[in-house]
């Protein structure tokens, strides 16, 4: 079970960073998905381009604005294209309503 819980306010960008705990990422790809429940279709699903030995980026303001308040799971699925080995890391987000005028 993921152990990290971060708070996101709808409409704010949110940085993320995933790695292989010091192991090389050469030959690996990374796709992130965001969903509320395991059986849900991913609300966010995109391939991340690596920077050095990490995959990092941001959930955009539009992406977080579309996330309903509540618990969300952002999962990085890392796959080795040669061996088909797979690793996953997940961060839990508590999405809270954004400010409305």
Image: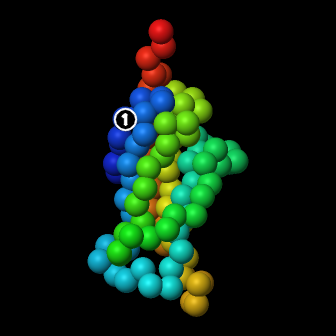
* Residue on which disc 1 sits: 7
Q: Is residue 72 left or right of residue 22?
A: right
Q: Can you say whether 8 is above or below 24 in the image?
A: above
> Which color scheme did the rendering employ for the protein?
rainbow
Residue 2 in view? no
Q: Residue at x 42, y 66 (%)?
A: 55
Residue 68 on image: x %, y %: 57, 29
Residue 36 on image: x %, y %: 58, 40
Q: Place residue 98 in its image quadrant.
A: top left
Q: Is 31 in front, or is 61?
A: 61
Q: Is 24 in front, or is 39?
A: 24
| Label 1 Cα neighbours within 10 Å, binned few <14 / some 14-19 / many ≥20 | some
Q: Is disc 1 placed on a helix, strand or loop?
A: strand
Q: Residue at x 48, y 30 (%)?
A: 11
Residue 53 in view? yes
Q: Residue at x 60, y 48 (%)?
A: 44
Q: Residue at x 42, y 80 (%)?
A: 25
Q: Is 2 in front, or is 43?
A: 43
Q: Residue furthest left?
A: 22
């Amino acid at each position: 079970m993921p152990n990290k819980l971060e708070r996101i306010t709808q409409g704010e960008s949110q940085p993320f960073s995933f790695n292989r705990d010091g192991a090389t990422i050469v030959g690996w790809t990374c796709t992130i998905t965001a969903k509320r429940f395991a059986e849900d279709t991913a609300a966010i699903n995109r391939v991340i381009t690596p920077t050095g030995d990490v995959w990092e980026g941001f959930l955009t303001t539009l992406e977080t604005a579309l996330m309903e308040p509540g618990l969300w799971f952002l999962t990085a699925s890392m796959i080795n294209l040669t061996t088909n080995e797979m690793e996953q890391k997940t961060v839990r987000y508590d999405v809270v309503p954004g400010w409305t005028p």
